[in-house]
Image (cartoon, rainbow, N blue to C red):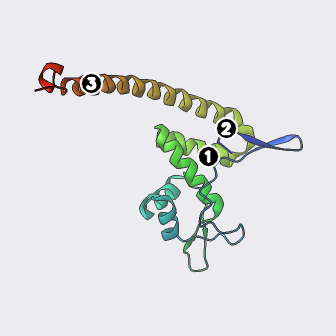
Amino acid sequence: MTVTETTSTSSTKTDSCATPFSTANRRPDGQDHYTISEVVAFTGLTAHTLRWYERIGLMPHVDRSHTGQRRYSNRDLDWLDLVGKLRLTGMPVADMVRYAELVREGDHTYGERFELLKTTREDVLARIAELQDTLAVLDRKINFYADAGQAPASERSR
């Protein structure tokens, strides 16, 4: 399920707010207690980044063990996957934090979440168009140099 998809339960819609994280090495729900080092291995994020996400409000409350050690769940991994996708879009951290706040506030924020994601999507489409133009220039240059490197036919037979 993507960020913009919803699931229907009776007459209400529930936003999953996250895309599924890789199911490889995932534990069944209820047994999904991951240490920060395991999450680092799964996500490629640093422990410092995970703590920072929590500090700025980008990461929802992370459960702790009786010794105070962070214990991440499958839901946390899904959320981190979404955050990673939002980072790839170029969404500013402040907007990601705002999105996280809206999710925590509840269903009445769907409209604002929609607008935030729609604006981000438009930005991504503009970047894609810009990159496609850049790719076309590179392709022309590559073709020019590939052709320029070929010896004229009259010289190849010698």
Q: Please state which of the two labelled residues, at mark 2 or mark 3, is closer to the viewer.
A: 3
Q: Please state which of the two labelled residues, at mark 1 or mark 3, is closer to the viewer.
A: 3
Q: Are marks 2 and 1 in contact (CB under 8 Å)?
A: no
Earlier-in-chain disc, 2 versus 3: 2
Which mark, by number, is residue 12?
none
In terms of depth relative to the viewer, which is nearer, 45 or 143? 143
Identify the amino acid type marked 3. Lys
Residue 88 place in picture, x, y as percent: 47, 42
Name the quadrant of the N terminus: top right
Q: Hey, which quadrant is residue 147 in on the image? A: top left
Estimate the spatial distance between the alpha carbons at disc 1 and disc 3, rounded to whole Å: 46 Å
Local packing at callout 1 (Cα closer than 10 Å; few below 14, some 14-19, many 20+) is: some
In terms of depth relative to the viewer, which is nearer, 126 or 120? 126
| Most distant residue in the right direction | 10
Q: Please state which of the two labelled residues, at mark 2 or mark 1, is closer to the viewer.
A: 2
In terms of depth relative to the viewer, which is nearer, 131 or 138? 138
Residue 157 visible in image: yes
Q: Residue at point 62% right, 71% down?
A: 33
Residue 43 place in picture, x, y as percent: 50, 59
Residue 52 place in picture, x, y as percent: 46, 57
Q: Badge 3 is on which residue? A: 141
